């Protein structure tokens, strides 16, 4: 979607529709009235007087304007009570409006961030609009071959600023939001892709493709021989049952200050998790194509960091493999010697994520990182504990966790911290190896986190379990059901404010 920044009143736009907001306790704010022309005011006044407009959250009206007016229609969206209309609701409202515009097969929409009436700064509203609209309109269509003519995309978003002084800031915020949205959509596309179309080798090609387009990113791909040479036996153990070769993807972005110790992001890249010999039940197994959502989020984050030219040094590590029950598959009872030297007794081959992450986390230490953060669809237990829309966070460094919490509040990607008390480590002790890969049913998310912490050394480390929010089962305001791309916005927000929080 093309984004245009214009100066003037929204009524002057020649867009097919203009989006305006109304509130339960302030139906049309003075600001919105002021942005309208005489004829639109009259029409809306009649709707209000008739009692049609209540301003409730998610209420939507399409108002056709007379032919003399430059804009075709007004899409009026309710935001509920003024004090409840936070940014998250604003993103959702823009998505709702854009969704209606798309179903009306419109080509262009116009918005006016200064006049949205939510009280937020114009550039903040502009960013929320771009996010809400781009993310809310996402559709994954490459495999639909019938009725392709019905697939409609809005081509143009016009952002109108009344005051000249807002132009630059609004333009910058919109551009940055578009970069982040593009990265989220990239991650969603990878996650939506079925495992026969996105193998570990395909993930590696995607990473190479990102680097080809950006000078500031370098990509290195380690194949299985290289992994053997290094001693990544936990990752190799998981991969044994599959006919697809594993890849260890390394993406390195250097911005200004690119010589400083990096922030290392590690993403679980299971292109398919069948459970292996500890086979998963058939029901919903197709969802396990999404078990590389952490890897996709890391790839999207590195890509956006480069496009935003963040003044940082960032490394993305993605161990990519399938987990399959082939004849050479690793088996319950097997003992694997991880890259760190620690040995792990395999209790369940379905607890494979922590095994591949163990090697990746240990590898991350070779960068002497400023911080390391792993992102993984790690445990079903996290969905039991926190629900489908919340990230489970654990970690060893208060400051790093605080950075993530702050970013979470700004982006609406909710997270909640779980403790890593010493008691939990009892559960992952093995009788015959250093560790076992399953700590039983109680606190399954935490014992998985405790297991990972054993491979993070003394570096500031945090773990994000995205098993819940990675795949959305019911439409949310600006996340259509399916792949959410969760993690990208959170991590980018944290990275954008990295220096400010030093
Ligand atoms: N990929 C799954 C976790 C998962 C489950 C993600 C549901 C998204 C939705 C992971 O590899 C797994 O299978 N974990 C096991 C661990 C258990 C064997 C200790 C689980 O959660 O059941
Ligand atoms: Zn599994
Ligand atoms: Zn898994």
Image (spheres, grey):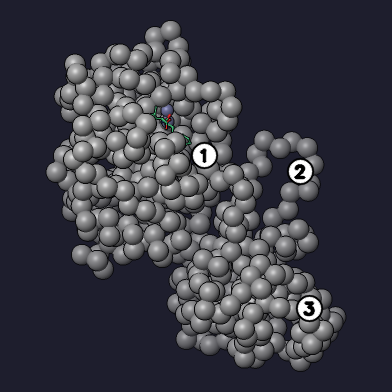
The secondary structure type at the circle numbered 2 is helix
Q: Residues within 10 Å of mark 2 (few under 14, many from 20)?
A: few
Q: Nearer the viewer, mark 3 or mark 1?
A: 3
Q: In which quadrant of the rendered view does residue 444 lie?
A: top left
In this view, 253 is above or below 310: above
In this view, 287 is above or below 496: above
Q: Residue at x 19, y 16 (%)?
A: 432
Q: Residue at x 72, y 70 (%)?
A: 60
Residue 253 visible in rendering: no
- Determine the CA span between mark 3 and mark 1: 41 Å
Q: Position of residue 270 (x, y in %)?
A: 43, 30
Residue carrying label 2 = 148
- Determine the CA span between mark 1 and mark 2: 22 Å
Q: Residue at x 66, y 84 (%)?
A: 27
Q: Nearer the viewer, mark 3 or mark 2?
A: 3
Residue carrying label 1 = 191
Which residue, as the protein is rendered here, is positioned at the far top? Answer: 327
Which mark, residue 52? 3
Given residues 15 and 445, the one toward you in this image is: 445
> Ligand 1 falls in which quarter?
top left
């Amino acid at each position: 979607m093309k984004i245009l920044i214009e100066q003037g009143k929204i009524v002057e736009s020649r867009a097919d529709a203009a989006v305006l907001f109304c509130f339960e306790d302030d139906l049309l704010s003075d600001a919105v009235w002021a942005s309208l022309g005489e004829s639109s005011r009259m029409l809306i006044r009649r709707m209000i007087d008739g009692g049609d407009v209540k301003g409730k959250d998610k209420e939507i009206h399409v108002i056709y304007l007379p032919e003399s007016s430059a804009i075709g229609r007004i899409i009026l969206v309710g935001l509920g009570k003024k004090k409840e209309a936070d940014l998250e609701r604003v993103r959702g409202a823009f998505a709702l409006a854009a969704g209606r515009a798309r179903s009306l097969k419109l080509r262009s929409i116009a918005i006016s961030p200064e006049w949205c009436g939510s009280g937020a700064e114009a550039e903040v509203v502009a960013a929320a609009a771009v996010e809400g609209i781009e993310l809310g309109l996402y559709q994954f269509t490459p495999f639909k071959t019938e009725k392709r003519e019905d697939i409609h995309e809005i081509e143009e978003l016009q952002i109108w600023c009344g005051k000249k002084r807002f132009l630059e800031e609004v333009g910058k915020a919109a551009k940055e939001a578009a970069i982040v949205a593009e990265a989220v959509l990239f991650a969603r596309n990878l996650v939506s892709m079925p495992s026969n179309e996105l193998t570990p080798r395909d993930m590696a090609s995607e990473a190479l493709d990102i680097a080809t387009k950006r000078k500031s990113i370098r990509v290195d791909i380690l194949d299985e021989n290289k992994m053997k040479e290094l001693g990544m036996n936990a990752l190799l153990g998981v991969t044994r049952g599959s006919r697809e070769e594993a890849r260890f993807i390394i993406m390195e972005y250097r911005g200004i200050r690119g010589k400083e110790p990096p922030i290392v992001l590690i993403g679980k890249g299971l292109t398919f998790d069948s459970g292996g010999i500890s086979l998963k039940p058939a029901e919903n197994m197709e969802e396990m194509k999404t078990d590389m959502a952490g890897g996709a989020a890391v790839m999207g984050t590195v890509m956006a960091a480069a496009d935003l030219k963040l003044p940082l040094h960032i490394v993305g590590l993605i161990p990519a493999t399938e987990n399959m029950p082939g004849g050479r598959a690793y088996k319950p009872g097997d003992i694997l010697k991880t890259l760190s030297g620690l040995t792990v007794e395999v209790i369940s081959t379905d607890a494979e994520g922590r095994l591949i992450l163990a090697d990746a986390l240990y590898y991350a230490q070779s960068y002497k990182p400023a911080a390391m953060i792993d992102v993984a669809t790690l445990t079903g237990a996290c969905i039991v504990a926190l629900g489908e829309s919340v990230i489970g966070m654990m970690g060893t460094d208060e400051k790093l966790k605080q950075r993530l919490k702050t970013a979470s509040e700004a982006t609406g990607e909710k997270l909640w911290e779980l403790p890593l008390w010493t008691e939990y480590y009892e559960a992952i002790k093995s009788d015959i190896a250093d560790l076992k890969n399953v700590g039983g049913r109680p606190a399954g998310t935490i014992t998985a986190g405790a297991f990972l912490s054993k491979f993070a050394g003394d570096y500031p480390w945090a773990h994000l379990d995205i098993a819940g929010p990675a795949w959305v089962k019911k439409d949310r305001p600006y996340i259509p059901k399916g792949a959410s791309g969760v993690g990208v916005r959170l991590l980018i927000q944290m990275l954008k404010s990295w220096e400010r929080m030093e």
